Image (cartoon, helix red, strand yellow):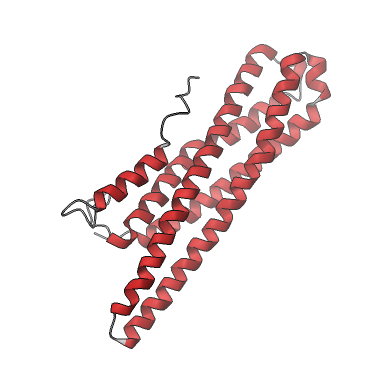
Amino acid sequence: MMYLSPRRLPVAAVMVALSAALLLLPGCGGGKSAGGAPEIANASQALTSLRVLREDLANGQGRLFTMAETLREATAPQDLALGPWFNRYRSQREGVRDLAMSLREGYANLQNAERVYISTWEQDLAAIADPELRQQSVDRRAALRDRFGRLGNDLDNTKQSFQPLLQQLSDLEVFLKNDLTATGVRQVRDRLEKAGSESEALGGKVSSDLAQLDSLIDELAPRK
């Protein structure tokens, strides 16, 4: 599997920067949603960050479950063609690492976009003369801020969970690179099984994050 040079700009960063630039163009302040409906100007950058992160996680989630299946195959090393199996293992470990990088970058972009969205909303409150309407806007802003906060906490938890898994996968790769035998695999079988369980559990966390992302995107996206 060929990977692009790490010097290229992350897709998430490019998409968010492009969205912000488009907001400055005449006639583009509100943007357009995928279905052609006008975006809410203040929410458009937050929506873009949510959608890009959602796409990255959805595209990469399967790598965790595939990694878990590959690790489970090692419970019977005598039945494995260890060379091809190890090549798949190394490739899939890189895929999991790339998913972790996408989550880290997308989460940072989302945090920045959410801060701009919520702070701009707070500044705009003073422009509402009607006290009752202003309070309704205050309450709505607080509710959405809390939703972003809950999503952020879960995304941060998922992000932190990648580090021990990736370290374990890296350690196992180095060990097996030097002892790719049935005996060597048997010696680390318990660790391989543990890494497989952790990979599958992390895939479940990503599923939960995707559900939250879908819900918040649906909440913020304007209707046609």
Q: Which x, y percent locates residue 136?
A: 37, 80
Q: Residue at x 68, y 28 (%)?
A: 170
In the rendered view, does 67 fall on the left or right side of 142? Answer: right
Count of number-bearing discs? 0
Q: Residue at x 53, y 51 (%)?
A: 209
Q: Which x, y percent locates residue 57?
A: 49, 42
Q: Residue at x 57, y 23 (%)?
A: 91
Closest to the observer: 161 or 80? 161
Closest to the observer: 34 or 43? 43
Q: Residue at x 44, y 54 (%)?
A: 112
159 versus 65 height, above or below: below
Res 55 quadrant in image = top left
131 versus 147 height, above or below: below
Q: Which x, y percent locates residue 53?
A: 45, 46
In the rendered view, does 82 fall on the left or right side of 38? Answer: right
User: In the current view of this chain or complex, which residue is farthest to the left?
Assistant: 27
Whether residue 19 appears in this view of the structure is yes
The quarter of the rendered structure image containing the C terminus is bottom left
Q: Which x, y percent locates residue 106?
A: 47, 45
In the rendered view, does 119 fall on the left or right side of 63? Answer: left
